[in-house]
Image (cartoon, grey):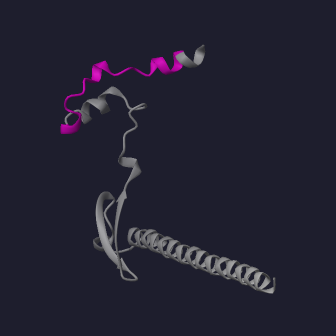
Amino acid sequence: MPVIAVLWGLGLLTAIALSLIWHGNMSRSLVHNSLRAAGSHATIEAAVHRAVAALLDPRPERRWRTDGMAESFEFNGTPIKVSIQDELGRIDLNQAEEPTLSDCSARPALMNMRLRALPTKSWIGARRRR
């Protein structure tokens, strides 16, 4: 009978030890993942701040372009590419007038569009009146 009690105790101690080891490994993995995520967030923040600083540079030849061309630099050993797109250069197809859309049709991507077949803005108001 004492042998069974000793084996039972050893089994419980083994289960406790395995639980502690598993918990320690899981905690280490969570901390490691959190540190990697924090490093990624820091890199992204650095890229944004570098882009803002480059846009505010008083020397025009050193300012970054706002036409979507990518600028490359390195932060903390990580290569980063940033492209800046001026939102004022975009066209809202739902609000644009027909002459604006006609000017866009000269571009190759929009060449095959039939602008006359596009729905007009009048259907938007008709739907709201119901």
Magenta residues?
107-126
Q: Residue at x 72, y 84 (%)?
A: 10
Q: Residue at x 30, y 31 (%)?
A: 101
**Quadrant of the image for the C terminus?**
top right
Using residue 19 as the reference point, say whether residue 99 is left or right of it: left
The image shows residue 70, relative to residue 3, as above or below, that is above
Q: Residue at x 38, y 32 (%)?
A: 96
User: Which residue extends farthest front?
Assistant: 1
Q: 110 or 56, which lies in front? A: 110
Q: Residue at x 37, y 40 (%)?
A: 91
Q: Position of residue 116 (x, y in %)?
A: 29, 19
Q: Position of residue 58 (x, y in %)?
A: 38, 74
Q: 87 or 17, which lies in front? A: 17
Using residue 84 as the reference point, say whether residue 128 is left or right of it: right
User: Which residue extends farthest top?
Assistant: 130
Q: Position of residue 55 (x, y in %)?
A: 39, 68
What is the number of callouts on the image? 0
Verify whether residue 123 appears in magenta. Answer: yes
Using residue 88 as the reference point, say whether residue 24 is left or right of it: right
Verify whether residue 75 appears in magenta. Answer: no
**Quadrant of the image for the N terminus?**
bottom right
